[in-house]
Amino acid sequence: MSFKRSLYFVSLLAFVALGGACKTTDLTQTGIKPADAKAELQAGNQRYLKGGVQSHSWQSERINYTGQFGQSPSVGVLTCADSRTPPEMIFDQGIGDLFVVRVAGNYEEVDATATFEYGYTALKMHTIMVLGHTKCGAVNATFDGKPLPGNMQVIASAIAPALAGLRTPDVGANGKPDLTLASEANVRWQAKRILLRSEILRKAKEEGALAIMCAIYDVDTGVVRFIE
Ligand SMILES: [Zn+2]
């Protein structure tokens, strides 16, 4: 064993021994255990809100570990491209923890679902979260219903079915939609779409090997609210 490699293993052992310094004492589990997923994401959001993020204190060890032994991210996240919603930050997660697909309006398409199928079958991903957010421009544009230029109509077309049921009861007197309700409806719809499209993921969920979560991130407060 080379000196450099010896040093690596010594530091790895020390890191494991110093379990209190990180989220996990077992580096073979780079992520979150299935039963702990929701609690860990909630706790991570609390750390983010309080400014007590801990992922960065052990990031270099995780880079070394995942680089050498590979990744096994626990939670797949489908979320918006909005620059205010980076999931690793708002859940205080590190390298190797999250398997993330981002697209404006966090809508499901075959690419996203194929990515999660890969995460589940090859990387031990056991949870999928669809994360929407308040004040989502893509949801707002879809509600407006005006034709979008270029390729952007694809976004509105994917979100529109999610909002169809909201138009009558939930539009305010001024004709403006309740965007938060709309984002919630969109998240639920896109989560359903993932399962509708994917037999692999549907079966995994039925067998209890995969959990699906929906949540809304508040861009004003930084709070993540889990929804049914
Ligand atoms: Zn958005």
Image: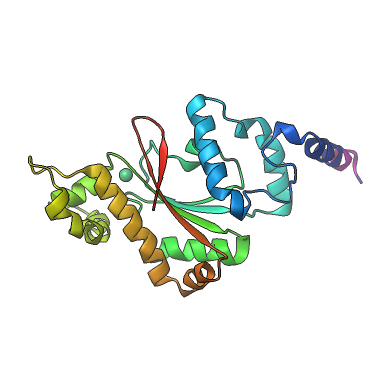
Check if residue 110 falls in the magenta segment.
no
The overriding secondary structure of the stretch rendered in magenta is: helix
**As drawn, is 120 to the left or to the right of 113?**
right
How many numbered marks, from 0 up?
0
Judge by depth and name the residue closer to the eye, 85 or 22. Answer: 22
Say whether residue 3 is magenta: yes
The residue drawn where x is 17% and y is 50% is 143
**Rendered residue at 66%/30% (across/down):** 57
Q: Using residue 123 as the reference point, say whether residue 190 is left or right of it.
A: left
Give the color scheme: rainbow, by chain, secondary structure or one colour: rainbow
Q: Locate residue 192, reporting x and y percent.
A: 37, 64
Residue found at the very far left of the displayed protein? 174
Residue located 72% across and 31% down the image:
21
Q: Position of residue 47 (x, y in %)?
A: 54, 31
Of residue 122 and residue 36, the one placed in the foreground of this image is 36
From the viewer's side, name the closer residue of 184 and 115.
184
Give the x, y percent position of residue 191. 39, 60
Furthest toward the top, the residue is 51
Ligand 1's quadrant: top left
Which image quadrant is residue 70 in? bottom right
Q: In this rendering, does residue 145 appear at all?
A: no
Q: Going by the image, does 222 lie left or right of 94? A: left
The spot of residue 7 in percent (x, y) is 86, 37
Instruction: Tell me the quarter of the picture where residue 195 sits.
Output: bottom left
**From where the camera sits, is residue 121 visible?**
yes
Q: Residue at x 8, y 44 (%)?
A: 175
Residue range (magenta): 2-6
